[in-house]
């Protein structure tokens, strides 16, 4: 189902946990809400699930008005499955009991319940564990029980609140792949919440970056990385250097900027204008050479990152050092020349 959140606000006392949030999630989309701790991600998910009442705006699920303007459809009537970080499994029930629970609540025939439970457990490869209690499973297995229960519920929409946060890094990777497979197999509209940008990049069709109760940018992961809207998005997503530049010319997505004594062509928004600007340069977009006619600087710090060196190069006193990835070995104090191969002029 589609999820439409329009200008939603939610206050806790005088604090706006959600401050005019609008997002539109398409049917079957894997949509990730990313942001630092306390920015309102969980509140957004809980508002969509019906676990919070909202103070302003509206929410529609599959075109049905479920929240806002005096309406609050209860969670059990919204037909969305929710998977929390804590899994929320019944500890006294077996794995199959947990998965069968929504089917029993729906008063299906005994045979149907058994067959569907089996089918759901098979899909998450947990059939051999059907009789175990949740306490006797690993974190990843418990997560899969929670997913199987969503399957059993027949929810065409699944909301996941940091479901991988409790897992060790190795298991997280494996579960990411399983979640992708789960999404592909079910085609369920998925809203996934995380503060881990690597996880967001790996899983999302689109990402909404949240900050202090507001959505800063909604975009495809590669666009969020290559074309961030403003300084805040640019600093949160990936690594890179932000430098002050003067825009000499800007025309149809291409700008000529003056920076550290050279002129460089860079990418920019269609409506970019001349004057002062801020340039984002990712570390892999700069080429280092020992000499040359590029921008001259001095190596301030070198860190080996396995396969490449991460180098801070000081260009001049008025700018912060720029970050460069290079496979060329350099040492602190070396004079180097930098060539900017690609960069993005921030629109805001
Ligand atoms: N029940 C509540 N009562 C009072 N304040 C709350 C309540 N729930 C959330 N908040 C506040 O609202 C803000 C947003 O919280 P929320 O849990 O949505 O953030 P989050 O982005 O999910 O954070 P995290 O990643 O740490 O879980 C925070 O400042 C939080 O302290």
Image: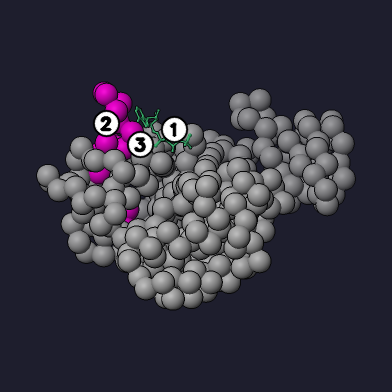
- Ligand 1 closer than 8 Å to label 1 CB: yes
Earlier along the polypeptide chain: callout 3 or callout 2?
2
Give the distance between the C-alpha atoms of the residues marked 3 and 2, in whole angstroms: 10 Å
Residue displayed at 39% across by 57% down: 81
Quadrant of image for the C terminus? top left
Instruction: Identify the element where label 3 is drawn.
Output: loop
- Ligand 1 closer than 8 Å to label 3 CB: yes
Q: Where is residue 67 in the image (x, y as percent from the top left)?
A: 20, 49
Earlier along the polypeptide chain: callout 2 or callout 1?
2
Asked whether disc 2 touches disc 1, contact meaning CB atoms under 8 Å apart, the reply is no
Q: How many labels does the image show?
A: 3
Mark seen at residue 97 = none
Residue displayed at 69% across by 47% down: 169
Depth check, front residue: 37 or 97: 97
Examine the image and state in which quarter residue 215 appears.
top left
Quadrant of image for the N terminus? bottom left
Residue 58 lies in the magenta stretch = no
Circle 1: is it few (<14), some (14-19), or many (20+) Cα within 10 Å? some
Q: Would you name the residue on which mark 3 appears?
A: 213
Task: Specify start and end residues of the magenta stretch as a single range.
Answer: 8-26
The answer, for residue 346, to whether it is visible in the render is no
Earlier along the polypeptide chain: callout 3 or callout 1?
1
Q: Position of residue 233 (x, y in %)?
A: 48, 42
Q: Position of residue 258 (x, y in %)?
A: 55, 43
Report ligand 1 position as a quadrant.
Answer: top left
């Amino acid at each position: 189902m589609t999820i439409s959140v329009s200008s939603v606000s939610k206050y806790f006392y005088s604090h706006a946990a959600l401050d005019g949030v609008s997002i539109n999630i398409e049917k079957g989309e894997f949509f990730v809400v990313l942001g630092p701790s306390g920015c309102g991600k969980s509140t957004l998910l809980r508002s969509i699930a019906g676990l919070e009442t909202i103070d302003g705006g509206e929410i529609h699920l599959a075109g049905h008005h479920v929240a806002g303007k005096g309406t609050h459809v209860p969670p059990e009537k919204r037909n969305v499955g929710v998977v929390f970080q804590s899994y929320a499994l019944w500890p006294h029930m077996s794995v199959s009991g947990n998965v069968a629970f929504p089917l029993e609540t729906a008063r299906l025939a005994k045979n149907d319940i058994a067959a569907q439970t089996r089918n759901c457990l098979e899909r998450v490869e947990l059939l051999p564990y059907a009789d175990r209690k949740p306490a006797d499973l690993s974190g990843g297995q418990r997560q899969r029980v929670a997913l199987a229960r969503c399957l059993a519920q027949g929810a065409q929409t699944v909301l996941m609140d940091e479901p991988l946060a409790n897992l060790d890094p190795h298991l997280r990777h494996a579960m990411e792949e399983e979640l992708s497979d789960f999404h592909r197999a079910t085609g369920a509209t998925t809203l996934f919440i995380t503060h881990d940008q690597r996880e967001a990049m790996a899983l999302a069709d689109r990402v909404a970056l949240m900050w202090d109760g507001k959505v800063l940018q909604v975009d495809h992961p590669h666009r969020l990385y290559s074309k961030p809207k403003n300084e805040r998005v640019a600093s949160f997503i990936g690594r890179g250097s932000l430098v002050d530049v003067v825009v000499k010319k800007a025309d149809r997505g291409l700008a000529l900027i003056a920076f550290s004594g050279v002129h460089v062509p860079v990418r920019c928004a269609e409506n970019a204008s001349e004057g002062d600007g801020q340039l984002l340069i990712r570390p892999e977009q700069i080429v280092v050479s020992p000499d040359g006619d590029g921008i001259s600087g001095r190596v301030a710090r070198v860190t080996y990152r396995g396969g490449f060196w991460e180098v801070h190069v000081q260009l001049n006193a008025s700018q912060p050092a720029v970050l460069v990835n290079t496979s060329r070995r350099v040492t602190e104090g070396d004079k180097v020349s930098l060539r900017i191969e690609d960069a993005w002029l921030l629109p805001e």
